[in-house]
Image (cartoon, rainbow, N blue to C red):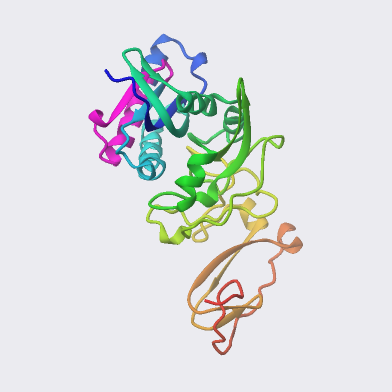
Amino acid sequence: MSTEALHRLVVSGDVCGSGRLGLRAKLRMREAMYDVFEAGFAAVGVTEESFHLEDRGDGVLVALDPHVPSAQLVGPWLEGVYQRLRQVNEGRAEPLRLRVAMHAGPVVRDEKGLAGRAVDLACRLCDSGTARSVMRLADRAPLLFVVSDSLYRDVVAEGGTCIEPEHYRRARVSEKETDEEAWFHVPRLPQPPLPDATSQEAPPDAAVRARERPCATGVRAARGPAPEQGGGTGHGGTVPPPASGPQPAAYAAKYRFDHIGGSNQIYDGNTFSGDFTGVRQGDAAAARGGAAPRRPATDAADDGTGPEGGAR
């Protein structure tokens, strides 16, 4: 076997809270964990011949062959993992929760396994105190995804199928000899809840807008203070309920849902050229249980402006 270093994408995965499980529960956990990872590889058509996988007890370490595109792993593979994770968690008393980290760089594979700085960094990002803190803060999220700063800049920031760079946040990771910046993402949350001591500025504007990506959720990164924790079963965090159908009483007081129909309508000083549904934080009257005043929409001449007041 050649010990020449090849540039590979490295994936490190770990199950949260596995130390609390008994033997039989650990075996069920391992079966579910492998099911989830295999579903991700099946989603992108990556066969067993295209990657090397090492068992880590309550996790796995994977190195992809150099010909496998990294964008396939940070996009469709991650989406496949997330969807399968939701499925295996249905009806489970103790849902499976995963931390997954990725980095790319020179990797050596000998008869004992994988070695190289890329391997070290992927493992430390996955097992870092920052990653563990994010999972504690997003306590109902089934999956945390972490990428190195270089992988974010080279792959994630370019966008693509199922890749949402605007939903990542940057934080510093200091573990052992590692002192690096990394990017954190919790699928279906506008942004991950980072510990205050580690968080950095929000990511730059994405190269590809969310609505142009096939798997995009359409949720923009939060601006200003993050909403209170909410969300449905299987993922926790800050996503409000959909802007249609009956709304929970707590959200009826906190948020207003507005719909504008027709062409060339003006609302809040902005011109809309078609149907638009939006959510806004309710005013004091709404918070007290009263109805929030609505601003009427009126016809206006088409002046070439879009929903944000800029050129369309």
**Where is residue 161 shown, x and y percent of the image?**
38, 52
Farthest residue, direction top? 23
Q: How many numbered discs?
A: 0
Looking at the rendered image, the quarter that the N terminus falls into is: top left
Residue nearest the observer in this picture, 93 or 204:
204
Picture coordinates of residue 252, whole percent (x, y): 62, 57
Give the x, y percent position of residue 231. 54, 44
Residue drawn 48% across the image and 28% down it? 122
Asked whether residue 44 is drawn in magenta, I would say yes
Does 92 appear in magenta? no
Image quadrant where residue 216 sits: bottom left
**Farthest-out residue, bottom:** 301
Residue visible at 40% across and 22% down in the picture: 60
Q: Quadrant of residue 83?
A: top left
Q: Is residue 103 above or below residue 53?
A: below
Q: Is residue 195 visible?
A: yes
Q: Determine the residue positioned at 54% across, 46% down.
A: 189
Q: Residue at x 34, y 20 (%)?
A: 109
- Examine the rendered structure and indicate whether residue 204 appears above or below residue 261: above
Side (left or right) of 263 relative to 199: left
Q: Which residues are magenta?
A: 30-59
Camera-side residue of 222 and 94: 222
Q: Is residue 186 visible?
A: no
262 or 117: which is nearer to us?
A: 117
297 left or right of 47? right
* Residue that sits furthest to the front in the current view: 4
